[in-house]
Image (cartoon, rainbow, N blue to C red):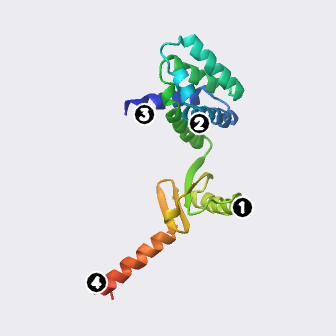
Amino acid sequence: MKNALIADRYAKALGAAIADTDQLESNLEALDALSVLLAESESLHGVLNNPSLRIPERVAVLDALLQRLKAPAPACNVAALMLRRGRISLLPNVAELFRRRVDQRSNRVAATVTTALPLTDKQAEPLKLGLQEFAGCDVRLDRRVDETIVGGVVTEIAGVIIDGSVRARIDRISRALIENDDGIMN
């Protein structure tokens, strides 16, 4: 809980530091890229969190990395501040909370679609357009794969779950057949 509050403060500060809404996406992309690098590289994570290295040395490593990522100044400043305060491990949380703020400022809602097989861009586009019509605003579509749904699509948008999976249909048919056998339904 405490870490969530701290991460939210950084996300809020970053949002406040960016007046131009056109700059929001590039800062978000930089935070996401840095988060992925920290998650994938134990050595990088170890260097940035190593108390035996002086803060300026760790900041120099972070600065070089952010420079290679071509990160905008606000994202660089927040990451450096987090490093100096010993909170760099909260970066993925900050990125996720900042993403929500970017979506809100951009009048966009996140939607997650889960399918049994990966969707192509051609398949995802009409789905996104339909969700935009449903939501009445732009949609950021996150795609996930889960073979257990067998087929169809499970969509979560703005807290609403639309389960159009084959697995859900089979479960509904199975429940109906069981209820009919017990004489509950006619």
The image shows residue 175, relative to residue 117, as above or below, that is below
> CA separation, marks 2 and 4?
53 Å
- Upstream in the sequence, badge 2 or badge 3? 3
Spatial CA span between label 2 and label 3: 19 Å
Distance between mark 1 and mark 4 Cα atoms: 45 Å
39 or 165, which is in the foreground?
39
Of the residues shown, which amino acid type is indicated by label 4? Ile
Tags 2 and 3 in contact by the CB under 8 Å rule? no
Q: Residue at x 63, y 23 (%)?
A: 76
Cα distance in 3D space between marks 4 and 3: 47 Å
Q: Earlier in the sequence, mark 2 or mark 4?
A: 2
- Give the percent coordinates (x, y) of residue 152: 56, 68
Residue marked by disc 1: 122
The quarter of the displayed image where residue 95 is located: top right
Mark 2 lies on a secondary structure that is helix
Alpha-carbon neighbours of circle 2 within 10 Å: few (<14), some, or many (≥20)? few
Q: Nearer the viewer, mark 2 or mark 3?
A: 2
Say what secondary structure mark 1 lies in.
helix
The disc label shown at residue 98, or none: none
Badge 3: few (under 14), some or many (20 or more) residues near its Cα, within 10 Å?
Answer: few
Q: Which residue is mark 3?
A: 4
Residue sitting farthest toward the front: 43
Residue located beneath label 2 in the image: 36
Quadrant in which residue 2 is drawn: top left
Q: Position of residue 175 (x, y in %)?
A: 36, 77
Question: Mark 1 or 2, which is nearer the eye?
Answer: 2
Q: Which residue is mark 4?
A: 184
Marks 1 and 3, Cα distance to the nearest angstrom?
Answer: 37 Å
